[in-house]
Image: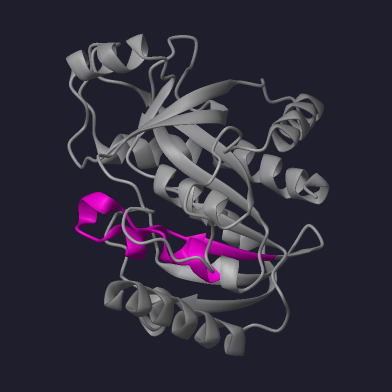
Amino acid sequence: MLKEMKIQTEIREATEFIEKKIQAKPELGIILGSGLGELADLIENKTEIDYKEIPHFPISTVQGHSGKIIFGNLSSRYVLAFQGRFHYYEGYEMSKVTLPVRVMQFLGVKKLIVTNAAGGINESYRPGDLVIIKDHINLIGTNPLRGANISNLGPRFPDMSEAYCKEWRDIARQVMGEIGIPYKEGIYAALCGPSYETPAEIRYLRLIGADLVGMSTVPEVIAANHGGMKVLGISCVTNMAAGILPQKLSHEEVIATTEKAKGYFIKLITRLIRFLD
């Protein structure tokens, strides 16, 4: 019980700090993955808050994650964008990995877009593709809801049958068609990391139905569903996963590919959020 009280205190104190810094209630949250943080540069009338300023927030240690909250207007919506996330492989507890989601929940946010850089398992994908996540497979080895349930955060056994809102996926399909981005949809598998997967692991993931692989997103989506949020997930395919092509994998390649894809990504998000209700 002491652990659960501590978690609630941390969420409340972080939320109160952010509330004092922003000028209005955010309507939509966005978590920006590796190399995708430049979307936040388009936010107008913005307030920037470094993670290190916020009580109980950890520090993002990964290249491509600048570690800031940006609040302001994007496509006529008040948004709260997180430039960088926290990962289980960095050594953080799941309560820290999901702290941004819980803070958004306490701020009254009901809509969330999660983005990530992912390896492509589906051989119809190519580096630079934007893929809408339709479902996920949690292979991290734990769950952010493990332990005593905190009832004011959500129910003991939350439904995950539509973890990624189908209505929003349909809207994404329409918007992508309008702006000339091929619509691709897939299942995202989350592993603990930080080592990249072996070719044998990728063959296993393909066998169980995964199209994409990464080391994030799933804990945030579980927490968001627990808290009653609608979620849209978008992966940027930064490389083909191990064993598919004769190549070595590196984080530098991830950043380089997201740099090339960022134009399409920004165009998609800025148009898409107008229609997410």
Q: Which residues are magenta?
A: 79-103
Return the x and y of residue 234 as percentages of the image width and height. Answer: 56, 37
Q: Quadrant of the N terminus?
A: bottom left
Residue at position x 80%, y 28% from top?
174
Q: Quadrant of residue 71?
A: bottom right
Residue 91 vertical position relative to residue 121 in the rendered view, above or below:
below
Residue 147 appears left or right of 113? left
Return the x and y of residue 181 as percentages of the image width and height. Answer: 68, 25
Return the x and y of residue 177 as percentages of the image width and height. Answer: 77, 24
Residue 178 vertical position relative to residue 5 in the rendered view, above or below:
above
Residue 177 appears left or right of 195? right
Residue at position x 18%, y 21% from top?
198
Return the x and y of residue 220 as percentages of the image width and height. Answer: 46, 51
Residue 120 appears left or right of 233? left
Residue 8 appears left or right of 18? left
Which residue appears farthest toward the bottom when viewing the image? Answer: 20
Observer able to see residue 175:
yes
Q: Is residue 4 magenta?
A: no
Residue at position x 60%, y 49% from top?
113
- 78 or 48, which is in the foreground? 78
Residue at position x 27%, y 17% from top?
202
Q: Is residue 102 magenta?
A: yes
Q: How many marks?
A: 0
Observer able to see residue 34:
no
